[in-house]
Image (cartoon, rainbow, N blue to C red):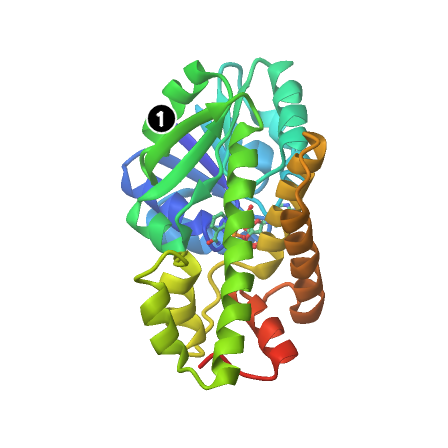
């Protein structure tokens, strides 16, 4: 099988490395071409100069960009995806995207007899390296079945969520919960620290009790208490995800004040900390307001 992978960012790169390790024939393209050249050398893949060149002759093209709009912007023009994709091939979009843009991309590709599924992932960079990502898929189940062997190179749990856009929506809601948990845990811990409680003692209790979450069990102990704040998932991308979730709630006319507030708070944090900050650095905003470190 011929696979094209476009977008070798923090999570795309280890996902593409899993495809390469599976033995499937792999072509890579990246906007900053030196990254694709380095990858191609390390993993014995072909390095394409343009998106069209990358997907020419590919059975499956995989995209992993920051936003659906970034994928959409690659469709047109002589170097674009539509110029290279062949009939009956499939575009697997692993971007954490938005449902409306994914549906537009599906329609453009359908006119060329190219299949499309939205297939965002969760499990982080370490899950991508280990090939244990969860993949939430929107689209025709028959297309998912054709794509499953490719998805299985980096995913362990592959779930069909509904029509095109459903994968995006489930991913956005998941990440909105992550964002909410990070902020709420930080607020509570900051108050406890100000009261004189050791945050490690507080986390010991919370993580054996009903308030626990991935934020309290993993992110805060490993990244905040240690002050390590490693850069694995950009705060700007989580801000985008919470905004998508708030938009899904708005479109479905579900009152969602907590999602909306979290989206606004992450927008403030993005403005404050910039485009390269890690998502867990949102805790620093709460710390600044409280005047304490959770450490
Ligand atoms: P990064 O910002 O690390 O990488 C983004 C990639 O997209 C880079 O290869 C970048 O190219 C490329 N890119 C950005 N804009 C464009 C554009 N306009 N046209 C073409 N290429 C572009 O992001 P991640 O790898 O972290 O995330 C990718 C997707 O996966 C996002 O939707 C994110 O929300 C999601 N995700 C990320 C996780 C993580 O832990 N990092 C976990 C789960 C999902 P260049 O090298 O030139 O900058």
Picture quarter with the C terminus: bottom left
Q: Position of residue 175 (x, y in %)?
A: 52, 48
- Residue depicted at 58% across the width and 60% down the height: 235
Q: Quadrant of residue 126?
A: bottom left
Q: Quadrant of residue 245?
A: top right
Q: Is residue 58 visible?
A: no
Q: Is residue 223 visible?
A: yes
Q: Position of residue 171 (x, y in %)?
A: 51, 40
- Residue depicted at 53% across the width and 76% down the height: 191
Secondary structure beneath dot 1 equals helix
Circle count = 1
Viewer-side residue, 210 vs 225? 210
Viewer-side residue, 131 vs 84? 131
Q: Is residue 177 left or right of residue 264?
A: left
Q: Is mark 1 within 8 Å of ligand 1?
A: no
**Pointer 1 residue:** 148
Q: Position of residue 258 (x, y in %)?
A: 63, 50
User: In this rendering, is residue 216 above or below 71?
Assistant: below
Viewer-side residue, 209 vs 74? 209
- Residue depicted at 65% across the width and 33% down the height: 80
- Residue depicted at 48% across the width and 20% down the height: 89
Q: Is residue 156 left or right of residue 109?
A: left
Picture quarter with the N terminus: top left
Q: Position of residue 241 (x, y in %)?
A: 60, 47
**Around disc 1, counting alpha carbons within 10 Å, would you say few (fewer than 14), some (14 to 19), or many (20 or more)?**
few
The residue most toward the bottom is 196
Viewer-side residue, 122 vs 82? 122
């Amino acid at each position: 099988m011929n696979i094209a992978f476009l977008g070798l960012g923090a999570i795309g790169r280890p996902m593409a490395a899993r495809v390469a390790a599976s033995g499937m024939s792999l072509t890579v393209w990246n906007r900053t071409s030196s990254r694709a050249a380095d990858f191609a050398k390390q993993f014995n893949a072909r390095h394409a100069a343009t998106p069209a060149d990358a997907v020419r002759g590919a059975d499956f093209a995989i995209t992993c960009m920051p936003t659906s709009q970034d994928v959409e912007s690659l469709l047109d023009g002589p170097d674009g995806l539509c110029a290279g994709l062949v009939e009956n091939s499939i575009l697997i979009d692993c971007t954490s995207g938005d449902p409306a843009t994914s549906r537009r991309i599906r329609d453009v590709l359908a006119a060329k007899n190219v299949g499309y599924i939205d297939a965002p992932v969760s499990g982080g960079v370490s899950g991508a390296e280990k090939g244990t990502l969860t993949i939430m898929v929107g689209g025709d189940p028959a297309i998912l079945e054709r794509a499953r062997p490719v998805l299985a190179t980096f995913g362990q749990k592959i779930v069909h969520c509904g029509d095109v856009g459903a994968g995006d929506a489930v991913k956005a809601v998941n990440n909105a919960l992550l964002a909410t948990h990070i902020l709420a845990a930080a607020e509570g811990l900051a108050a406890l620290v100000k009261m004189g409680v050791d945050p490690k003692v507080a986390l010991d209790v919370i993580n054996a009790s009903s308030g626990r979450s991935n934020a309290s069990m993993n992110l805060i102990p490993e990244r905040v208490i240690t002050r390590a704040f490693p850069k694995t998932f950009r705060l700007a991308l989580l801000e985008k995800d919470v905004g998508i979730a708030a938009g899904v709630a708005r479109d479905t006319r579900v009152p969602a004040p907590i999602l909306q507030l979290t989206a606004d708070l992450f927008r403030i944090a993005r403005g404050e900390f910039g485009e390269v900050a890690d998502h867990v650095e949102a805790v620093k905003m709460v710390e600044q307001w409280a005047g304490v470190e959770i450490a």
